[in-house]
Image (cartoon, grey):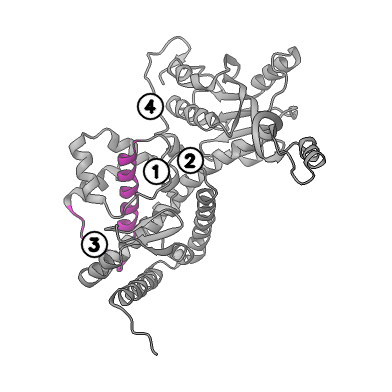
Amino acid sequence: MKHVKTQTEWEYEMSVKILDLIRSELYLDLRFLDIALSALIPREDAALKAFATDGIYLKYSVSRTLCIFKDNPKFLGRAYLHSVLHCIFSHLWLAGNREQNLWNTACDIAVEYTIDCMDKPGTRRILTWNRQQMYNHLKNIPYGISAAVIYQLIEGFDEEHQLALQAEFYTDDHRYWPMQNQQQAAVQNAKDQWNKIARQVQIHQDQHGGDTTEGERLMEAQIKAGRSRRSYSSFLKKFSVLREELHCDPDEFDLNFYTYGLRLYKNMPLVEPVESREIRKIQEFVIVVDTSDSTSGSLVKNFLRETFHILHQRESFFAKCRIRLIQCDDQVRSDQLLEDLSHYDQLLDQFTIIGGGGTNFCPAFSYVEKLIHDGTIPRLDGLLYFTDGRGIYPKKRPSYQTAFLFLEDFDESKVPPWAMRLQLSAEEFISAGHFTRRTDTKQGRQI
């Protein structure tokens, strides 16, 4: 007998067709998003009143989707694009220790501003007075737009203003965004997948050619900002070394007990997990900060805070570790040793930029080589040099891994071939932490 659809089955089938129609219409306006628009897998969730995503599924309520499509189909297309852009910009995985509600609002503003600047027929809407006021704030930001920058901006607003912005820009539900402490394989796979999609979007944008809208330029800048943060976190892992650490390893067991059990009980092996395992982490590290007159003190401190935050994660560092923080312009100005990463906030609270001269990278490398020769640094895993790149580089390759981190464009030809290099987005460190202003001293600069 022919199956007769129930009302529930028919509604579900119609909701799937609506989502397909939404994707098709968005594709006509935004062809460079073809892969991104089909990356999320639709999944029904009756408890939702808006779209929601965890980076893998696009979750939605069938009844709400049908109702909204009947009254305002253009809103559904905009909401769908809104959730996709959150994934492209990596908003789901960049919250860090920020206040969650405020971070959600900042992400919504970043996405809505991008969509409104695109000004496409399928997603166009009338701007309310609150939106226009907020967009005027964003246009006055000189160093680029990202959710991190917007977070810092609205953090200074009063609570009433923040709540008004939350209501104005709310579009999708963020309840399924991964929590900061979630490290499941599925979460990591989703991050990696959207990282690839973001790169493909950039490539397709370049191939698209023609006139680029302000919204498309905003999108490209935010993709770069999100990738910069992800790249820096993974970049630090290049300095890890393989060593043994005390830790119960459930994936391995002692073969002596295993075979002893077989001999003694015939068919009953004894399994005991090993008490240590080999793992790649960082143990001894040097961070050199360029304190020449061209380096921004506030960005230096926020960079250090972000770096220490990444290194403080247990999977990045051994329990016993040492970080040496060196300040250098045309000579070494200070050397601070941090042996307990839980005290990095205390170090940063007392941190003052010392220098202000020209830029010469050689003194820092000579100083570190002397510490190695004296036995002060028994085994160095790597050195990070945070700089604007305009200085004198050493000609001789050091005995340890070295990386130069640049916050702006740099002359690739002047960087030694033996050095790793990574260009970071300055705006991603704007809200990495708050910095304290101090009065100038003879050698200290306000930070």
Quadrant of the rendering where the N terminus is positioned: bottom left
Mark 4: which secondary structure? loop
How many residues crowd around disc 1 within 10 Å: few (fewer than 14), some, or many (20 or more)? some
Residue depicted at 40% across the width and 18% down the height: 446
Residue depicted at 43% across the width and 46% down the height: 178
- Contact (CB < 8 A) between labels 4 and 1? no
Rounded to the nearest whole Å, what is the CA distance between mark 2 and mark 1?
9 Å
User: Which one is earlier in the sequence, the residue at label 2 or at label 3?
Assistant: 3
Q: Is residue 142 above or below residue 190?
A: above
Q: Is residue 66 above or below residue 287?
A: below
User: Which one is earlier in the sequence, the residue at label 4 or at label 1?
Assistant: 1
Rounded to the nearest whole Å, what is the CA distance between mark 4 and mark 1?
19 Å
For badge 3, the amino acid type reads Arg
Q: How many marks?
A: 4
The residue identified by callout 3 is 125
Residue in front for this viewpoint, 206 or 171: 171
Q: Using the rendered view, name the quadrant where residue 349 is placed.
A: top left
For badge 2, the amino acid type reads Ser
Residue farthest to the front, as pictured:
265
Q: Using the rendered view, name the quadrant where residue 383 is placed.
A: top right
Residue 225, percent from left and from top: 46, 45
Rounded to the nearest whole Å, what is the CA distance between mark 3 and mark 4?
36 Å
Q: Which residues are magenta?
A: 99-128
The residue identified by callout 1 is 144
